Image (cartoon, rainbow, N blue to C red):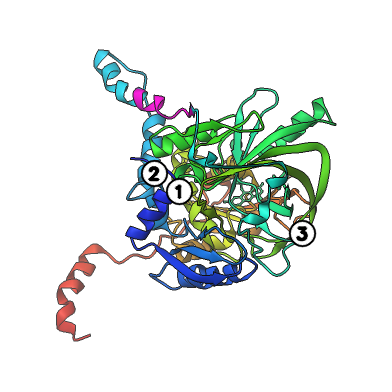
Amino acid sequence: MAYRDLREFVKELEKAGQLKRVRVEVDPVLEITEVTQRIARDANRKPNSVGPAVLFEKPKGSRYPLLVNTFGSVKRMCMAFEVNELDEVAGRIRGFLDTKSPQGIFDKIKMLPKLAELGTFFPKSVKDGDCKEVIHKGSEVNLRDFPILKCWPQDGGRFITFPLVFTKNPESGKRNVGMYRMQVYDERTTGMHWQTQKHGAEHFRRAREKNPEGRIPVSVAIGSDPATTLSGMLPIPPDLDEMMFAGFLRKQPVEMVACETNELEVPANAEIVLEGYVNLNEMRTEGPFGDHTGFYSLEGDYPVFHVECITHRKDPIYLTTVVGPPPQEDFYMGYAVERVFLPVMRMQYPEIVDVAMPAEGIFHNLMIVAIRKSYPGHARKVMNAIWSLGQAMFTKMIVVVDHDVDVHNYSEVVWKALCAVDPERDVQFSLGPVDTLDHAARMQDYGSKMGIDATRKWATEGFTRPWPEEILMDEATRKRVADLWKTLGI
Ligand SMILES: Cc1cc2nc3c(=O)[nH]c(=O)nc-3n(C[C@H](O)[C@H](O)[C@H](O)COP(=O)(O)O)c2cc1C
Ligand SMILES: [Mn+2]
């Protein structure tokens, strides 16, 4: 059974010993970040240790509790998706992608349960929801009621860091949900930090082309059941409804309820909902913000979100996350995305055996890819594929290795990849869109990428020298020594 809402997940985390409560008052300005760093990040850096989720029951200055580090371990990501291994989610996706055309009546009958399951993914509109227990409109709207974090000393203010931002494509009418941080300017105004390549920004641009003086409706849900919450960060194609994907993940439709003051719908189980609009002709300085690169992202001009109505549960839990030097909570969310979307990547590029994105590469800086190499130049083809694949386009460095390298074993990757390259020959540069957070790029959003072909080189690629074999002891000797081992006195 899918989690009903965020608080049911909190209960499960607590039962599983994965949640700590902090009962003393802690300040959402800086202090909660520092506590989170000690509990989560520093703990996670020690082998075999991961910090728990933390429920701050008394954030200073607010009546509402704050939840952080909710998804900050592989175990909790598995709990979020109700699986034992993330590969189970990947397996379900593979199951749908592998569906062959039915060959006869038995095949057709066998497909029925799968089709029925497909039907359960679509979001369902409902008349009312728990998110409407309390409704504030007009002058009652006050974002300062909530324990919104100022995470790091040089942050431009307080930021809502875990929002689901709902918009509608002004042409197709299709919904988008993205997780874009929001800087609080005052009681009723925030920034809207959708980066230029993201779907919310595209909706904004298209609407502005038609009517530069107009506005678009925007609603924001904070704190829903885990699958729905996480769907906001998934790198799925434009016009594919994140709420449908959430339904797939939780195996139960997401219930959507109409907003009070605009035409959008939001998850009925949300803890907090902000309704309002974004003016198409208004921009304001956003940032700086201590980002997941481990550096401050600089100030920039972003649209402004005007909140006209806030609805929430009677006792809402304010869900948030802290980013900063890796690894932080978002690493585990990104890792789950990497595992879950591998089968999708492999459907289009079956030569891809495995991929890894080390935490220190903060997703966009480094991807290690193992391929089954079949033809000359294959590694470079895969680099180009990744640079054209959704948000993988941002990947600054791609290292392509042969299928027999374990991409998750970074020491093996460094060893074998460095042995396999002649740098001048094997490095491929390319120009294109880069992550907005890449502060080293020559311009914001535009810069260069590098691919390293660390596969064995072939004669058909002009490498005519013999390629040496990796050193391995023969089986017979290994076995003999294993038998002798106890007698050796070592
Ligand atoms: C905690 C967290 C914060 C994020 N903040 C932002 C942000 O401020 N701006 C942004 O463009 N993307 C941000 N992202 C990444 C987007 O959520 C992600 O790219 C998502 O796929 C965007 O949805 P879209 O593809 O529908 O635009 C954040 C992700 C996480 C996990
Ligand atoms: Mn989207």
User: Residue 218 occupies which quadrant of the picture?
Assistant: top right
Q: Is residue 477 left or right of residue 214?
A: left
In this orientation, does residue 251 appear? yes
Element carrying mark 2: loop
Q: Tell me how far mark 1 sits from mark 3, CA to CA.
A: 33 Å
In this orientation, does residue 384 appear? no
Q: Nearer the viewer, residue 223 or 419?
A: 223
The structure residue drawn at horizontal position 68% and vertical position 46%, both measured from the top left corner, is: 141
Q: Is mark 1 within 8 Å of ligand 1?
A: no
Which residue is the site of mark 2? 3
Residue 243: x, y in percent?
51, 34
Q: Are marks 3 and 2 in contact (CB under 8 Å)?
A: no
Q: Are marks 1 and 2 in contact (CB under 8 Å)?
A: yes
Residue 152: x, y in percent?
67, 67
Residue 22: x, y in percent?
47, 69
Q: Nearer the viewer, residue 129 or 87?
A: 129
Q: Tell me how far mark 1 sits from mark 2, CA to CA.
A: 7 Å
Res 298 label: 3
The C terminus, quarter of image: bottom left
Q: Amino acid at mark 3?
A: Leu
> Is 401 within the magenta?
no
Element carrying mark 3: loop
The residue range painted magenta reads 116-125
Q: Tell me how far mark 3 sits from mark 2, CA to CA.
A: 38 Å
Q: Amino acid at mark 1?
A: Leu
Which residue is the site of mark 1? 6
Element carrying mark 1: helix
